[in-house]
Amino acid sequence: MHILTAREFTRTIVDDFIESSRAFRAGRRADHRSAVVGLLFFEDSLRTRVGYEVAATRLGAATTTVFNLKQSAAMGTPETLDDTIRSVAGWLDALCVRHPDEDAVPRIARSAGIPVINCGNGQDEHPTQALVDLFAIEELIGGIDGLRIAIVGDLNAMRSAHSLALALSVYQRVQIRCICPDGLGLPSQVLEPVRCSGTTVESTALFDVAGMDVVYVCGLPAKTRAGELSDEDQAAYRITRPRANAMAPHARILCPLPRIDEVHRDVDDTVQAGYFTQSDLSVWMRMAVLDRVLTAQHAGM
Ligand code: CP
């Protein structure tokens, strides 16, 4: 059993993950003492890599970090990805993988013979970040059905935005407002299935979050597919304290982090700032994810 894309999520699957996360948060224990989880990150990661390490430890499992191919190169010749996976997968029970190449994680999943968790494949997806985001919304706001959710930033390139939009499409009556500069909207391969599910998606280049329950901010770098953005262009999409204060008291600002400057630091102590709580909550969801894949692996599913 792999977790490669939010396209495979159903309402039953996400509800099960959320229920399991709540149970772990409430003190449920699981015993995966015999398991070893491999962490294979070809890109930098703090939250996802360390988060899965902590989650595995809390489940009783051990972890091992598989250093990337360049670091493990012998005699100056990098070992191939396929040979690396063939070598380590036989010793492990699951692999958490991040890779800058969109095709690498699915390719690893095809050959690994153990569950693979996609921790970010290029600009494509980050499906378990979406599960973290759904859990945070559930815990901070309540149910997700019927919510109005703004997603702000470079929605073309940000994999967290892709997986979140796809994951939200399993809910009823969710309205997504994409707020981004022209040319940086969700790619059609994300937008089309989300719209086909019946989820309403509107797009605007204006920063307008009036009436939103959640404002999900996922970063707007200076260099984008649509060209260079000036600081003024970027500032138009930044969350400032006045903008946070103008949001409804129940509304929350979420961000997958790391942030650069898309959310001003003086927003952190507003009631609407939910991003560090979102980060705190992520460990329970990562436990739920590992518990599910390790249980399935040991049951031979
Ligand atoms: N949100 C997220 O993926 O953070 P890291 O890059 O630190 O893992």
Image (cartoon, rainbow, N blue to C red):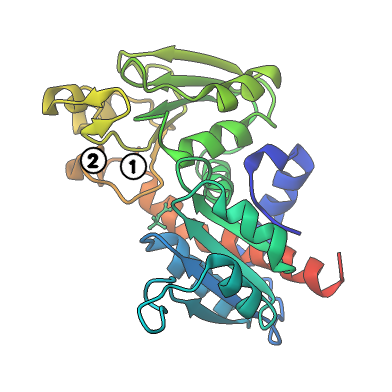
Q: What residue is pinned by disc 2? A: 267
- Could you tell me the amino acid type at mark 1? Ala
| Left or right relative to 59: residue 227 | left
Displayed quadrant of residue 68:
bottom left
Q: Amino acid at mark 2?
A: Val
- SS for tag 2? helix
Q: Residue at x 63, y 55 (%)?
A: 107
Hey, which residue is sitting farthest left in the picture?
A: 231
Q: Residues within 10 Å of mark 2 (few under 14, many from 20)?
A: some
Q: Earlier in the sequence, mark 2 or mark 1?
A: 2
Q: Which residue occupies the foreground of this view, 116 or 141?
A: 116
- The quarter in which the C terminus is drawn is bottom right
Residue 159 vs residue 69, the one in the foreground: 69
Residue 127 in the image: state x and y as whole percent.
58, 47
Residue 87 locus on image (x, y percent): 62, 79
Label 1 C-beta lies within 8 Å of the nearest ligand 1 atom: no
Quarter of the image for residue 116 reads: bottom right
- Please name the residue that numbered disc 1 is placed on: 273
- Residue contact at pointers 2 and 1, CB within 8 angstroms: yes
Q: Residue at x 35, y 49 (%)?
A: 257
Quadrant of the picture in which ligand 1 is shown: bottom left
Residue 117 position within the rendered picture, expressed as x and y whole percent measured from the top left: 62, 59
Residue drawn 79% across and 43% down?
Answer: 12
**Residue occupying the far bottom of the picture:** 34
Alpha carbon separation for disc pair 2 and 1: 6 Å
> Which numbered marker is on residue 72?
none
Point 70% across, 45% down: residue: 14
Q: Secondary structure at mark 1?
A: loop
